[in-house]
Amino acid sequence: MKKPKFITEFEDIPAPRAKMPELPLDERKLNFTEVELGLAREAALAEASRCLSCRRCIGCGLCLAECDPDAIVYDMEASSSKATFDAVVAAPGAEPYNPAANPALGYSESANIVTTLELERMLNPTGPYGGLPIRPGDGTFPSRVAFVQCVGSRDEGIGAAFCSSSCCTQALEQAASLGDALGTVSVTFFHREMRPLGRRGEELLRYAEENDDIDFVFAGVTGASGVDCEGPVIVKYDTGDGDREREFDLVVLSVGQRAPGSTRRLARSIGGKQNKFGYVATTPLAPTATGEDANPVAGTVARPMDVGGAVAAGSAAASQVLNGLDGAVESDPSGAESGVESGAESGDGSPVDDGPAVVALCKYGLTTAGLDVSRVSHAIGESSGAPWVITFPTACVTPTVRELGRLADERRASRLLIVGCYPETHSGFWRAKAAARIDRPLAVEIIGGGDGADAESVARAAGEWLAGGSPERCTDDARVVENRTLVVGAGVSGLSAAAELARRGVPVTLVEAGTELAPRLRGAAIADPDAAEALAALVERVEAEPAIEIATGSTVASVERTAHGFESVLTGSSGETRVTHGALVLAAEATDYDASAIKGASPDSVITQRELTERLRGGAADLSSVVMIQCVGSRTPEHPYCSRNCCAEALANLHRILGENPETEVTVLHKGIRVWGFDEEMFSDAIDAGVRFVRVADTPAISDGASPEVTAVDAETGDAIRLAPDLVVLSTGVVAAEENAAVAGALGVDVDGDGFLRAADEAVAPVRSRCDGSGPCERQCEGVFICGSAAWPASIEDCVTQAQAAAGKASLHIFTKGPR
Amino acid sequence: MSKGSKKTETVANGDAVAVPDDVGRSVLVVGSDAAGLTAALDLADAGARVTLVEEAPFLGGAFKRHARFPGSGMPAFCRATEVIHRATRHPRIDVMAGTSVSRLRKSDGGFDAAFRTEATRVTDACNECGACVEVCPIKPYDVFNEGLTLRTAIDWPSTPAHETRPNIERETPACTETCPVHIDIRRYVGLVVEGKFAKALAVVRADNPLPAICGRVCPHPCESACNRGHQDEPVAIDAIKRFVADYEASLRRDGKLEWPPAPKRTRKERVAVVGAGPAGLTVAHDLALMGIGSTIFEAAPVPGGMLWLGIPEYRLPRDIIQDEVDYIANMGVEIHYDTPVGPDLTLDDLRKKGFKAIFLGVGAHSGLKLKVPGEDDFEGFMDAIVLLRKINLGDAEKPGNKVIVIGGGNSAIDAARTALRVGCDEVHIVYRRSRREMPANEWEIDAAIEEGVQISYLAAPVRILGEAGKVVGMECVRMELGKLDASGRRRPVPVEGTEFVIEADIIVPAISQRPDIDFLGDDHGLDISRWDSFEIDTRTGQTNVPDVFAGGDDVTGPATVIEAIAAGHLAAKGIAKYLTD
Ligand SMILES: Cc1cc2nc3c(=O)[nH]c(=O)nc-3n(C[C@H](O)[C@H](O)[C@H](O)COP(=O)(O)OP(=O)(O)OC[C@H]3O[C@@H](n4cnc5c(N)ncnc54)[C@H](O)[C@@H]3O)c2cc1C
Ligand code: SF4
Ligand code: SF4
């Protein structure tokens, strides 16, 4: 938090800070007389009067006089309480890095240097400036904005040799929002490699790269300063060939995350540990538990992550608590999700009468859905003749709801229609809200902007309801479902999901196209020996678990919805099997990109990173030089996405090689190294160890023959590079598994162009599948959950977290419906 | 079955929601950011009974402050509103906002927790009309909006959409929150404005038994946090503290003020305190206030620990230390100087003498090695701590003419400025990084330069040069910020061929210190960390040996006076509890 200069209210107490009187310099020689002399009485009094008393309540009584219900008690005391619990979930969130700690960044000096958090508030419609991103210094709109990435991250000098993982994506999202809010604005990213996270991150980066108003400068920022509130902000940066400067109107510091200060105490009290960065320590195959008792922890206190990651971790941690408690928790549909959402509030939307209605348009909701508010308002007026169509900036805020109540009273209305909100999620919210804030009983309905809606279709829906019709609502008829879940794919995600479901008391059928469990990972890919061991233990547990039926060498031939969930047919070597199940988890993991064409004639000296991992298990061979080529089959026109793990695997392997033979010359040809979270340290250590990292323009070429030659072009200098190493290692990417898409297609679950499954909402519903819009109903993919690299290339931690979350959601789905 | 589940009638918005009987187990979720909210809802939906605690007055943490979540079709505001609404109204979620977990402990199969819930000063009668916000004349920065605007003393989102209660804030301003001993700064500063100096000092003393000392040497983190800094410059909190402390001392010196009467001893047990540094003094002080007698055993001939042995006199005059120590001695605390605990006076000896608990506040006095060639070969090599101790104990003979101090922390600056004062002709500080990275306080670096200390930044020692067994100089190499590497960093690397020699007859490394625990002998049985510090229970200061407590630099490594005082408070409470139980 810092000084927005155009707020002037504090100028009533000016007085500069008192200067400490000091012993003159020439009197300090050869003696120990005190140098600081202390404030004189007057100076001390004046200085003390500069205190703002922090502008907290002074008990003046003005509000008490205004408070009708006499709800104010000035001398209310803090209270203490005690309770016992069966389990604790630690989810204290993260703290942002405070950029004032580095004075060179000018954060404390200039009002026009802000953090991403400040910009986030500015872009929020209920934020300080009504959703407008302005320069806090003088209130004008910025036309040149700079983002400075990695502020307080990736900096071992301050004990933060980790990537905060979420800031690049957040900043890219903000850059896009700035464009939406301001029309024309040029944005510059000063970055140390953009690291977009997840599908949305990649989309945003692609959008930004194609956008002429957004440019990227790979540079270390050495300083920023803005002298006055009206003037520009200067950014000083270094691109490798000396210092440069550029002027901007607004500078946004992408501040990193920190584990909160309370982590130490919290970790201790739940029997957990901290890692060296202060985060709660977890392991790759148990990413949401800490300590010997595996106490659940969730979210950014375990490692830097984005909202989607935190939500998945929350669900995963919750699921584990339910496992840990002896005996399954009894289900109680009455209070469960569905019950709360549309519960016993005032009506459920159906008893529509044709009394007078108040129609409120949410400008924010409609605009975000890309609709023109005045057109919608006009169209509703035209088509239904509704007399009272009122537009509010944000319809749901309490003052607006009060106003709606007043209007309803005035007009003796019996119905309230909210246009632009979200019927799928917000129905329960609106009914509760109306019941609480409006005395008059009202039937409440919501019509949303929705996918592909236009002003006319929204108006039509509104008109129908106003005329007494009931809007089409998706309902899920199945009331009681089969207590079984089909898990497709037995990689690390599928195995974790199956194990979790079994522990929750849900029988599982685990179908895997390969002939053994964890086909891809068993062979190689887990470089970390502890993780490999944990995976082996997981495989054993799944094999030994009586509640899990394993069908290896099998695929799902067909799947359809029934009254009690799903019915699937599996085909395998032993013929056809029919499975009825109440939920479905799609977890077939992405497979390795096939690099055999590139390996060409020298399969021994050109190998994949995975083969190298396997080879290194037996110790590093005596290699004098190794070239690693990143992004083979990733970030190409054919597979435009980042495969997420290849940089980390390459770094882990090269450290293993250097560990045994520090003399080995290692060159990494890359398109930008992307490692997130704590893996960053491997990167900086590799640089320190003398590994040569060369950014290349295009995928390097490898000559045929027994001793391959690698040629490439250095993207920075344009120089041709020619290398003849002992070994060429291809960091091959992943491609989406076909099994998921086949099943998804049959159920109307959305699959993207690359074959990955889309989540209902990447941020807040990351493991629920999304309907592809082919069916009539938005609930058609209910009961279908996705996780791990079935949805998007993911780290092992993310795979396991999402798998546990998906398992948790699947059991919840079965138990709240009621198992048959 | 379900033990301890809290039975709560959740009443939200006036709707009484039927609470099903305890159907599951009780789960505490700490934190209501994205992960915490999700966990709470999932658990409650599955039938568990959830208590969701959040330190802030409102649910949602950072989750609620976003504008957009990348990858979400719905604006963050709409989403957060709905999720928080659902959590607030869920019949099986008991929301405790404005609440911190004051204790959390494993107990047979579950957890015992204690909470502290801050007062909101608004009762459930509130109908959220917002009238209070209209009339409140106080205008603090709106922290929820990152200080980009002002709000009132009533912390209430300007446009609440889900259930909230206004929260009239009265306590814990930023300064007090940041202060390690949480002095009620706003109060004493206010009392100074009213001219009530004695009362002001009493407020300081309530949390800090060494006000005149801290008024001089505290690095005052409170000032960095002070909200006034957002407007122009922070309030000079520390200088005001010094003023009231000096004012009282001057009255006492002029004979206008008596020592306060010693607190009554109400308990017969005595406690042995090892070390008369700020940690030990604080323990003795606090115990005296609780009616528990104590004896301090101090190895040095003077009190104060590093205050006297480390911090130079020109920053902290010795009569000031003596005054504050006398104040504590006058409370009935016995202090034995020149009495090291060690082979001649072991912990067991202390036990045999009848001390029922022992506090170890021995500080961190052992200087770390430089690890450059020649370090151990020549005379004229002296750690900063050794040099300062020698001079501070009255040996003001200059150690040499040309001095090199190695390091960039406060003790490097202290050593350099001290060397000038005892008559050294030339004083160099050699520091491997740039000024920006120098950990010493900005104002102290300025003062050192003004006084004539020469600082070589970006220079690293290569080897110590000597002749005839004596130091004659040091070879250094220039460091340079290296090329921008593949990860976009530039770090100092030695530049070949830039070696240069600084002549010196004395070299003073001021790298860092560690506790010296040799005095304990071999069979002390205490848990010691990798850094030779004591391992303690951070809630009580107790070591693994039940009657031995520790705190200050010997637990944290070199830190600050105020942190040592905070550790002393904690340990005194821990000891009192131990003696009672
Ligand atoms: C040069 C220098 C400058 C500093 N400047 C500042 C500053 O400006 N501001 C600030 O806040 N902090 C400063 N510090 C740090 C601060 O002085 C210490 O953090 C603080 O004094 C620690 O208090 P303590 O009680 O833990 O230990 P100490 O102050 O180190 O006291 C320990 C005492 O125990 C005694 N002792 C040790 N062993 C035995 C034994 N076996 N038997 C009996 N007694 C024993 C020692 O003689 C000593 O008196 C400075 C430190 C140094 C070295
Ligand atoms: S690279 Fe990592 S730390 Fe740096 S801004 Fe991007 S996500 Fe944050
Ligand atoms: S203005 Fe500064 S000193 Fe005064 S109460 Fe606020 S934070 Fe504390």
Image: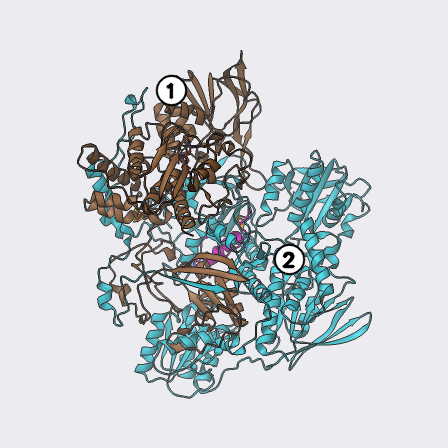
Chain colours: A cyan, B brown
State the residue at coordinates (24%, 66%): A64
Residue A97 magenta: no
Q: Residues within 10 Å of mark 1 (few under 14, many from 20)?
A: few
Q: Label 1 lies in what chain? A: B
- Residue ID for mark 2: A793
Q: Nearer the viewer, mark 1 or mark 2?
A: 1
Disc 1 residue type (three-letter): Asp
Q: Main secondary structure of the magenta part?
A: helix
Q: Is residue A412 left or right of residue A697?
A: left
Measured as percent of width and height from the top left, residue B38 is found at: 51, 65
Instruction: Specify whether residue B386 is in view.
Output: yes
Which residues fall within the magenta stretch?
A162-185
Measured as percent of width and height from the top left, residue A616 is found at: 74, 44
Residue labelled 1 has its Cβ within 8 Å of some atom of ligand 1: no
Q: Is residue A608 left or right of residue B536?
A: right
Residue B197 versus residue B32 in the image, above or below: above
- Residue ID for mark 1: B395
Measured as percent of width and height from the top left, residue B536 is found at: 48, 45
